[in-house]
C-alpha cells in the first residue's frame, strides 16, 4: 500500500487534539503562518492549550482567534507584542494568560533538542538575566552557561509551499523559518501547503523537511 | 554455557543463508515504516524488500529513501549506504546532512533498526561493537545511536559463532552497545522474540526441533502462543 | 543622574535623523563583514549600505544576504526581515531554517550585530528588551542571542529619552539583555566607543561641544586619541 | 571590494596550520573525502595533529598518507577500521596512535554544538557503556543521559560539489555527509570543489552550506 499523507478535509488534518496539548505553530510575522490549520484547531475544540509560536498573533484571525476564544492557557514565545497583537495584549494586561518568554534562538534550539532526542543543552544566552532566573547555570571551560530543556510539541501546525505524498516539504523564502524545527519536535506534524506534487518531483537535494517528520498534509 | 561440539547439532536442517535471513526479516517490516539497516547482514534487506509495501529506508550517512543496489556499471561513488556499498535512491528520497540523519535516529523518528550483533542477551542487551581484541581497533559507528534511538530493534545474525557457541546468551560477554533494547532476533535457524517473560520462539526453519535449537541457545526458550 | 531640563541643551546642533544614524553606523562596517541588523532603527541600515563594500546582512528569521527594501508593489509577504518589513535578496543570498540562523548567531559566526537599546552602561551593559511595564508584555526576540553571540555589538539609539534623560548611563535601570557586550554607540549626536578605560567619544555632530554632550550623558566622557 | 573566497593555489588554500591543531576531515567512506586538501596539509607540514573523521583512512592516500607520515597524534572517529584502513590498523596495533572512539551521531552533534556556541548537551546514547566511562551522567525527567562536550576544529577540510565566490556550497548526493557540520564547527573552513559558479547561480533555497561558514575554496 502506498504511503499517502495527503488528507482531504480539515477535520482529518487536525485529528484528535486533547485538552492541555502543546501546539507548535510555525511562522515569523505573517510568513509561514498556518492560519487555516489554526482555524481548524479552533473548530476542533481542544482547550487549555500551550502554544509555542514566535509571535502571539496579529488581529483576531488565526492565533488571535484561538486566544480570543480563551483556548490558550499558556504561550511560549520570544516576541509576543507586535503591531496588531491586540488579543494577546488584552489578555496579558488582564492577567488572563501565562507567558513564558524565551530568547528566540533558545526557543528554536530547545525544539531541535526535543526533535533530536537530547535531554537538554547549555546555552550562553541569557546568563545573568531575568530570563535565566531559576535555571541551573554552569561554568564550562571558563564560560558561563544556562541549562535549557527540550521543548516538545504534541502537535505542530506548519505552513509550507509544496509537499508530495510522503510528506516531503519545501518552503518559500523566509516562510521557511520555524517549519522545519517544529516538524522535528512534535509527536504529530500537520502541514498546510499550496501545492501537492508527484512523488519524485521534489529534487532530493532540495527537500528541506523530509517526510519522516510529517504526519498529515492538506492542500489549501 | 559452554558447549563442546564436535558435530553440528542441526545437521538436517535447511539453514537460512544470509540473504534469506535478510529476506525473512524484511518480510516482517510493516507497510509505511521508516527503517535503518545496520551495516553488514541487515544491509542485504534493501535488495529483499517485500512486494506490495512501501517502506522508507534510511542510511545514517545521510540518505532517506534508499533503493536497491544499482546494476553493475551504474554505481555512483557519491551514492552509498552506511556499509559504503553502492545504492540507488527511490522517488521521494532525500539527501541529508549527517547530523540531521542522527536527529532522526536519536530523536525516535526511525520505527525499526535492523542491526547485526555479536551477542544478544535474554533481556535484550545488545553487544555489537567490540570484541575487545587489543590488536583490532573497535568501531562503534552508529550502533549505539540506533540501539537507543530507534523505536524497535531487531537483530539479524547467525545463531552461533563459527565455533558453534551460542550468540544468544544469558548475559553478554562482550561490552554492551545498549541494555535491554532488542525486541526480536532473526537467525539462520529461527525467529525469536525478546519478551518480558523471556525468549519466545516465533518460528523455526523446517526440520528443526526446539530441543536442537535450545542446545545451541544460552537462555531457556519457550514457544510463542 | 537626574536632569531637570526645560530647555534643549543642544539647541544649535544638527542632530542626525534615524536614517542618518543608520547611515553613519553602516559606513563603519568593514568590507566583507557578516552583519545582523536588529529590529527598529538598525534595520534602516539595509537601505544605507556603503558603496564599494560587499557586506552580507543576516536576518534571524532565516535570511542571509538581505538586500534593500523592494520598490512599492514589489513586496513579497514571504520575503521579510526580523522587523517583518519587506526586503529583497542579494545574489549569493540563501534561505535558512530558523535554528540554523541562530547557529550563526550564537556560534560566533556573525561579525557585527547592530542593535537598538533603551540603555547602555559605561561598561557596555545592554538593556533593550523590557521596561518592566506590567501592562505591556516584554519581547526579547533575538536580542539576547545576538548580544551574546555576535563578535562585536554596536548600539544605535537616540542619545536621550523623549524626556531628555540620558540613555547612556552609569548603570542600567532596566533589566539587562547581556552584561559588558556593547563596543560602540551611535546616537543622533555622537559616536562613542565603550573601552576598558571608559566611554571615549570618536565623533560629535557639527556644533556640539563635549560639555553639552556630557550634560546629557550619564558617565564621564573622554575624547578619543 | 568584492568578497572572493576562491584561491588559486593549494598553499593558499591550506594556509598556516599550527602543530597540535585539530583538523576536521569530511567524508563517509570515499564520498565527500577531500583527498587533495589532505595532501595539501601533508605538504604544509603541521604535525602532532588531532584528526576528526568518521573513518581512519583507506589505503596509503589522503588520511592514510597523513597517518603513515606520523603526523597524527590522535584520531577522533566512530569507525576507524574499514576494509583498507591498513595504516591506521598498524599504528593502532603498535600503540602508536591515540583513538577517541565516539558514537557516530554523538560525534556529529558535538561538532554542531561547537558550531552553535553551546557548552554541551545531554545525550541518551552510550549510557552505561564503556564509551560513557568517565563522563557525567544525569537523570532528566526519568531518563538517563550522558554529558557530551562540543568538538571544535581549528581547521575543517571539506569536499563539496560546487561553490560561488561567497563560499556558498552545494554537495552531491550522499557526499554531503559531514561537510555541513564540519564547516560550522571549525575556526577556518577550506573546501575543495569540482565547480565554481557565478554568484547568484546557486538557488537560495538550495544552498546547503552558506558562505558564512566557509573561508577558502579551491577548484580541483
Image (cartoon, coloured by chain):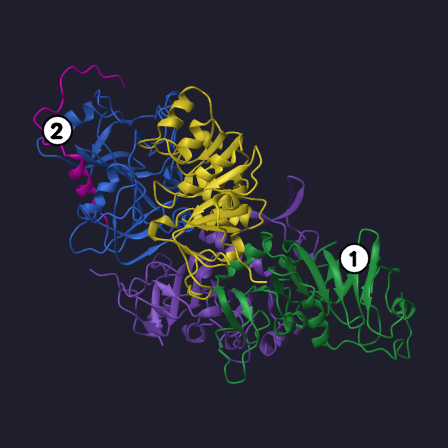
Chain colours: A yellow, B green, C blue, D purple
Q: Main secondary structure of the magenta part?
A: loop
Q: Residue at x 66, y 72 (%)?
A: B40
Q: Mark 2 or mark 1: which is in front?
A: 1
x and y percent of residue B220 in the render?
89, 60
Q: Is residue A69 left or right of residue C136?
A: right
Q: Which mark is residue A135?
A: none
Q: Residue furthest front?
A: A8
- Which of the pair A158/C155 is nearer the observer? A158
Q: What chain does mark 1 sit on? A: B
Describe the element under mark 1 as helix, strand or loop: strand
Q: Marks 2 and 1, how far apart in space?
A: 84 Å
Q: Is residue C28 magenta?
A: yes
Q: Chain of mark 2?
A: C
Is residue D120 at all visible to an observer of this figure? Answer: no
Magenta stretch: give its range. C1-29
Residue C56 placement (x, y as % from top left): 27, 53
The circle drawn on residue B194 is 1
The structure residue drawn at horizontal position 48% and vertical position 35%, both measured from the top left corner, is: A43
The residue carrying mark 2 is C209
Q: Is residue B141 above or below residue A172?
A: below
Q: Is residue D88 visible?
A: yes
Vertical arrangement, residue B179 with respect to residue B54, above or below: above
| Number of residues whose C-alpha sits closer than 10 Å to that of mark 2, classed few (under 14), some (14–19) or many (20 or more) | few
Pick whichever, B190 or C165, lies toward us. B190
Specify the quadrant of the image occupied by residue B81: bottom right
- Give neighbour class at mark 1: few <14, some 14-19, many 20+ (Cα, 10 Å): many
Residue shown at the point (54%, 84%) measured from the top left: B72
**In percent of the image, x 22 and y 44: which residue is there?**
C45
Looking at the rendered structure, whether the residues under marks 2 and 1 are on a common chain is answered as: no
Amino acid at each position: 500500500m502506498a504511503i499517502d499523507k495527503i488528507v482531504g478535509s480539515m477535520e482529518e488534518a487536525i485529528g484528535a487534539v486533547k485538552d492541555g496539548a502543546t501546539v507548535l505553530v510555525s511562522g515569523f510575522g505573517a510568513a509561514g503562518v498556518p492560519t487555516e490549520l489554526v482555524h481548524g484547531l479552533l473548530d476542533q475544540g481542544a482547550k487549555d492549550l500551550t502554544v509555542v509560536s514566535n509571535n502571539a498573533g496579529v488581529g483576531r484571525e488565526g492565533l488571535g482567534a484561538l486566544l480570543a476564544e480563551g483556548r490558550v492557557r499558556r504561550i511560549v514565545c520570544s516576541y509576543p507584542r507586535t503591531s496588531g497583537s491586540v488579543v494577546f495584549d488584552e489578555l496579558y494586561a488582564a492577567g488572563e494568560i501565562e507567558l513564558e518568554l524565551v530568547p528566540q534562538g533558545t526557543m528554536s534550539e530547545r525544539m531541535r533538542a526535543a526533535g533530536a532526542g537530547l535531554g537538554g543543552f547549555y546555552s550562553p544566552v541569557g546568563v545573568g538575566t531575568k530570563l535565566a532566573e531559576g535555571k541551573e547555570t554552569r561554568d564550562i571551560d571558563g564560560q558561563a552557561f544556562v541549562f535549557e530543556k527540550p521543548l516538545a510539541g504534541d502537535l505542530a501546525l506548519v505552513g509550507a509551499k509544496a509537499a508530495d505524498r510522503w510528506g516531503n516539504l519545501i518552503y518559500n523564502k523566509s516562510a521557511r523559518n520555524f517549519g522545519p524545527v517544529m516538524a522535528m519536535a512534535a509527536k504529530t506534524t500537520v502541514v498546510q501547503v499550496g501545492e501537492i506534487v508527484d512523488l519524485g518531483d521534489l529534487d532530493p537535494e532540495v527537500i528541506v523537511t523530509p517526510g519522516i517528520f510529517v504526519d498529515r498534509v492538506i492542500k489549501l | 554455557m559452554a558447549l563442546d561440539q564436535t558435530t553440528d547439532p542441526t545437521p538436517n536442517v535447511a539453514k537460512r543463508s544470509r540473504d534469506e535471513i535478510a529476506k525473512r526479516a524484511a518480510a516482517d517490516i510493516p507497510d509505511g515504516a521508516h527503517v535503518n539497516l545496520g551495516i553488514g547482514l541487515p544491509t542485504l534487506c534493501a535488495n529483499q524488500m517485500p512486494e506490495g509495501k512501501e517502506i522508507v529506508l534510511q542510511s545514517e550517512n545521510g540518505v532517506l529513501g534508499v533503493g536497491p543496489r544499482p546494476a553493475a556499471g551504474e554505481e555512483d561513488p557519491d551514492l552509498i549506504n552506511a556499509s559504503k556499498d553502492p545504492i540507488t535512491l527511490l522517488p521521494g528520497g532525500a539527501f541529508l546532512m549527517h547530523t540531521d540523519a542522527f536527529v532522526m535516529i536519536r530523536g525516535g523518528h526511525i520505527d525499526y533498526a535492523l542491526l547485526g550483533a555479536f551477542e544478544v542477551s535474554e533481556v535484550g542487551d545488545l553487544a555489537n561493537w567490540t570484541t575487545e581484541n587489543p590488536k583490532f581497533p573497535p568501531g562503534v559507528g552508529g550502533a549505539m545511536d540506533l540501539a537507543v534511538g530507534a523505536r524497535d530493534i531487531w537483530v539479524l545474525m547467525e545463531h552461533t559463532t563459527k565455533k558453534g557457541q551460542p550468540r544468544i546468551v544469558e548475559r553478554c560477554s562482550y561490552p554492551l552497545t545498549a541494555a535491554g533494547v532488542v525486541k526480536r532476533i532473526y537467525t539462520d535457524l529461527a525467529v525469536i522474540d525478546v519478551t518480558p517473560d523471556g525468549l519466545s520462539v516465533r518460528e523455526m526453519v523446517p526440520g528443526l526441533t526446539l530441543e536442537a535449537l535450545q542446545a545451541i541457545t544460552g537462555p531457556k526458550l519457550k514457544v510463542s502462543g
